[in-house]
Image (cartoon, grey):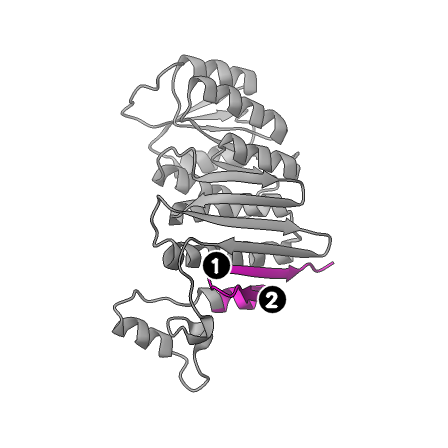
Amino acid sequence: MIHDSPQSQKTVLVVGCSDSLVKNEVSTVLSSWRLDCARDNEEALALVEKSAFDLVITDEASSGREDVELLRRIRLVRPHTRLIIITDRSTPADVIAAMRAGAFSYLTKPLSTGALEEVLQLAIELPACDDAIEVLSGTDAWIRLSVRCDVSTANRLQQFVREFLDLPEVDEDKVATASREMLLNAMEHGGKFDPQRRIEIAYLRARQVVLIRIKDPGEGFSLQENLETAANNPPDDPMRHLKHREAQGIRPGGYGILLARNLVDELFYGEKGNDVLLIKYINK
């Protein structure tokens, strides 16, 4: 195994460099990084074997499956290299394989507005991480994950969720946002944002419905008795939860459950209060 050597300047390797939008986005967001190009995945692997890169970005000339194979081969010599997959040929199985192999992120063209920029910003902010997202089981329709209890993992997971569920545009943002809000809620209240703790989250994509179940390691709570959430504010006191949070020394917030309820069709908590089920019916 080749050991990565420390470098004063961060480096990014872009495969293809034929897409000016991708190259320009990388050059802008990672302006302080050195940018190198490779013609294809084989040349990218050869370059990575010679010297360490902090980040590798593929292009649409290869499929998601081929890019996952590139990642596996890179990891044999550079186990902490982050790889962002950009492709125009993808399946849910490819997305699952990418998560299993430890891809940093996964995007299918055409890229949604700001998607690549968000992922690149995360690449700047986060250290290389290999176990933040673990696939416990996965099929084309149903995936179950164990995720590390921190905000950065929730942010990374959101893009994988979009790719795996492959929803109509009208539903995609709603489901991804609701999922993230409830995951953050579980991380904060159940996991106490302790990166040593894990949250279990499952996604089921059926023909006309998406189900998301999130289970945290906490003791649970009673939603009906919780005064910290805006979901329980009475009509004549819409700011009650903020006053309660301030009195308890809790940060401003408490809108996650209310927001998620407005984005999905149904939301249910389990008896203990440490697991929640979100249901979104798909518009045809």
Q: Is residue 139 visible?
A: yes
Q: CA distance from mark 2 to mark 1?
A: 13 Å
The residue positioned 73% from the left and 52% from the top of the image is: 207
Q: Which residue is mark 1?
A: 182
Residue behind mark 2: 266
Please name the residue shown 57% across and 27% down the image.
Answer: 67
SS assignment at label 1: helix
Whether the magenta-drawn stretch holds residue 236 is answered as no
Where residue 151 appears, as percent x and y from the top left, is 39, 49
Residue 114 visible at all: no
Label of residue 90 in the image: none
Segment colored magenta:
258-284
Question: Mark 2 belongs to which amino acid?
Answer: Glu
Q: Quadrant of residue 187?
A: bottom left
Q: Nearer the viewer, residue 189 or 73?
A: 189
Q: Is residue 46 above or below residue 192?
A: above
Direction from residue 217 to residue 66 in the image, left or right? right
As helix, strand or loop, the secondary structure at mark 2 comes to strand
140 to the left or right of 224: right
Q: Which quarter of the image is occupied by the N terminus?
A: top left
Q: Residue 20 in the image: state x and y as whole percent.
A: 53, 33
179 vs 273, nearest the viewer: 273
